[in-house]
Amino acid sequence: MIVRREAVLCLEEVSRDGAYANLIVPNYTKKLTDARQEGLFRRLVYGTLENLLYLDYILEQVSGKKLESLDERVLWGIRIGTYQLCFMDLKDHGAIYETVEAIKRLNRRHSAGFVNGVLRSVQRKKEKLLKIEDQEPLDELSIKTSIPKFILEQWLELWGINTVIEIAESFQKTAKFFIRPNPIKIADEILLRKLEEQGYTLDKSESVEHCYSIEKPFHIVETNAFKEGLFAIQDSSSINVVNSMNIESTDTVLDMCAAPGGKACHIAALATNGAVVAADIYEHKVGLIKDYADRMGIKNMEVVQQDSRKERPYWCEKFDKILLDAPCSGLGVIGRKPDLRWKRKREDISELAAIQSELLEMSYKYLKPGGILTYSVCTMSKEETVDHFYRLDNNPNWERIDELEGQFLLPMKTEGDGFYVMHWKKRA
């Protein structure tokens, strides 16, 4: 009962306050007593967000009321109840009972009968309700994968329908949890042994160096290994971006949009006799980067608050390499952060692409002649990726390094986040 109650409250906060699930989930798991409860809670919260369109498609057929007219707490209650009945291997009567009891404990006792009736209807008609009928193919895919249609349309500008289906379906699978050992403090094999002794199961990535997935990472941030900075929690695609930079030990590197600091600290760990500058526009994020660097034992990195769209004369032609991991629409992380798909709007993409263009223009000034720019975004929209590639390709000040139009790291191939990365050399 407590797990369902806390799940409803968490989802209500995401919806009502615009909170990000990944940031507030720890506030709720603190109230739970064991790993089993935490696992169920996370499954209810993230599973409901990942299947929201599909759940609402089902509920619209049985609720007898317009969903937008329902009390928000009651609506989240029937959503998590329907998620349990349709997508989890739980006993139906237990799922219904626990959800109804949670609603009662949330001061919605007067709605308990309605919730019970809706969930009983879902239980009886489940097989029929799960069939998506009389929909256009793209609308059907949108409902089935709970990805807004405008996002699917963004991907169709880049790929055919079969690839779009693969991408969409890959985001419905549980996102893998990756770590990167910190070479400043420990060798990979010693870290693996330490974590395995504490009961964690790790698998080495076949395609990304110094990258390992953990099957059940519960309480990993409470381990001494994490607190001592022996490893970073970092997605495989993020690790891959830094690996692609071919950092040399004496490089001077600028990370123009560095928060929360994972890539910057990774770069600093490789440029052992060089120097790294990590910049971010927001003061609180600068603090996050500093905390990250302190935990990882980074000594060769300067952290500054800076809007990297505005020229900083001291930086001009100072850097061998620049990472521009630009602010973006985040369409490549909607598997890991499913609530992002409900926060993002179509017009955001053009606004973010304009910011990216400003940052790209400034990166040219900061590079030494012959220096290398790596541009990356955790998204997959044409405006934020290949459109920038062709703009730079037509600029005589830049020399193309990549043979293709940059590289998309697609989730069904990497098992990580969706990313785009491209590399350019400043002509001397």
Image: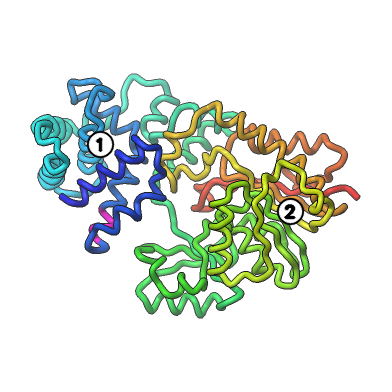
Please give the residue where the numbered disc 1 appears in the rendered image. Answer: 76
**Residue appearing at x 38%, y 34% in the figure:** 146
Instruction: Confirm or deny contact between disc 1 and disc 2 (CB under 8 A).
Output: no
Q: Is residue 408 visible?
A: no
In the rendered structure, the answer to whether residue 197 lies left or right of residue 28 reads right
In this view of the protein, which residue sits in the foreground, 372 or 343?
343
Which residue is painted at 60% across and 73% down in the image?
A: 183
Question: What distance separates the C-alpha of mark 1 from that of mark 2?
Answer: 44 Å
Q: Which residues are magenta?
A: 36-40
Residue appearing at x 38%, y 71% in the figure: 200
Residue type for callout 2: Ile
Q: Secondary structure at mark 2?
A: strand
Relative horizontal placement of residue 193, taking residue 366 as reference (left or right) = left
Amino acid carrying mark 1 in the image: Trp
Badge 1 element: helix
User: Can residue 91 be seen?
Assistant: yes
Q: Position of residue 75 (x, y in %)?
A: 24, 32
Q: Nearer the viewer, residue 209 or 293?
A: 293
| Callout 1 crowding tier (Cα within 10 Å): few <14, some 14–19, many ≥20 | many
Q: What secondary structure prevails in the magenta region? A: helix
Residue 369 or residue 240, whichever sits in front: 369
Q: Position of residue 122 (x, y in %)?
A: 17, 33
Which residue is label 2 attached to? 322
Q: Residue at x 60, y 65 (%)?
A: 209
Is 57 left, or right, of 121 in this rendering?
A: right
Rendered location of residue 27, percent (x, y): 33, 54
Q: Earlier in the sequence, mark 1 or mark 2?
A: 1
